[in-house]
Amino acid sequence: MNHSLEGSCQCGEVHYQIKGEPLVLYRCHCTECQKQSGSGFGMSMWVRNDDFKILRGSLKHFQRTADSGGKMECFFCGNCGVRIYHKTLNKKRDYIVLKPGTLHNTQALQPTADIWLKSKQAWFVPPDETDHFEGPPDFKEFLET
């Protein structure tokens, strides 16, 4: 299947394209995703490095330590500050973690999991149709299906 998605930051300075299917999509309830999203959770979608391309603009970046203890590098628009993606620095991975709210069309997004539920907001009830994890899961099972 020839799958292509496009997205941008809030101000429109940075535009990107994804070719190929996303690997996994989930809601993350860790405290860092709550801060980054300004909400009760953040959405994350894994995309293969080779499937992601910046079409216009450039990204700034910074490093931080995740709730799991791993080191991450976060990439964002230097003008409006919207994060486009992040990636782990502890292990070499062949994917990035895209912030799918930056996609131009988000209507078809269906998360398959809710992670870091031990730090979720009290008002959030995870839906029965997603897998539930109290902390960071081992996503190998998702990547192999």
Image (cartoon, rainbow, N blue to C red):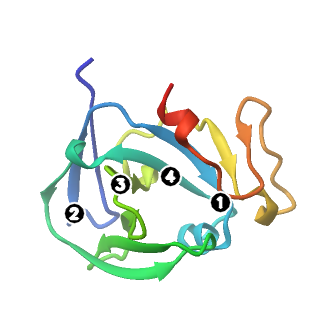
Instruction: Indicate left or right for 8 with 90 as reference.
Output: left
**Picture residue at 37% right of the left edge, 73% below the top:** 73
- Give the alpha-carbon distance from disc 1 to disc 2, as whole Å: 24 Å
* Residue that badge 2 annotates: 14
* Residue that badge 4 annotates: 44
* Residue that badge 3 annotates: 93
- Give the alpha-carbon distance from disc 1 to disc 3, as whole Å: 24 Å
* Residue type, mark 2 in image: Val
Question: Vertical placement of 110 versus 139: above or below?
Answer: above
Question: Vertical placement of 103 versus 19: above or below?
Answer: below
Question: Vertical placement of 15 versus 126: above or below?
Answer: below
Q: Earlier in the sequence, mark 3 or mark 2?
A: 2
Viewer-nearest residue: 100 or 136: 136
Q: Earlier in the sequence, mark 2 or mark 4?
A: 2
- Give the alpha-carbon distance from disc 2 to disc 4, as whole Å: 19 Å
Give the secondary structure at mark 3. loop
Q: Residues within 10 Å of mark 2 (few under 14, many from 20)?
A: many
Is any atom of residue 110 visible in this view? no
Q: Residues within 10 Å of mark 4 (few under 14, many from 20)?
A: many
Task: Farthest residue to the left: give it.
Answer: 56
Is any atom of residue 80 visible in this view? yes
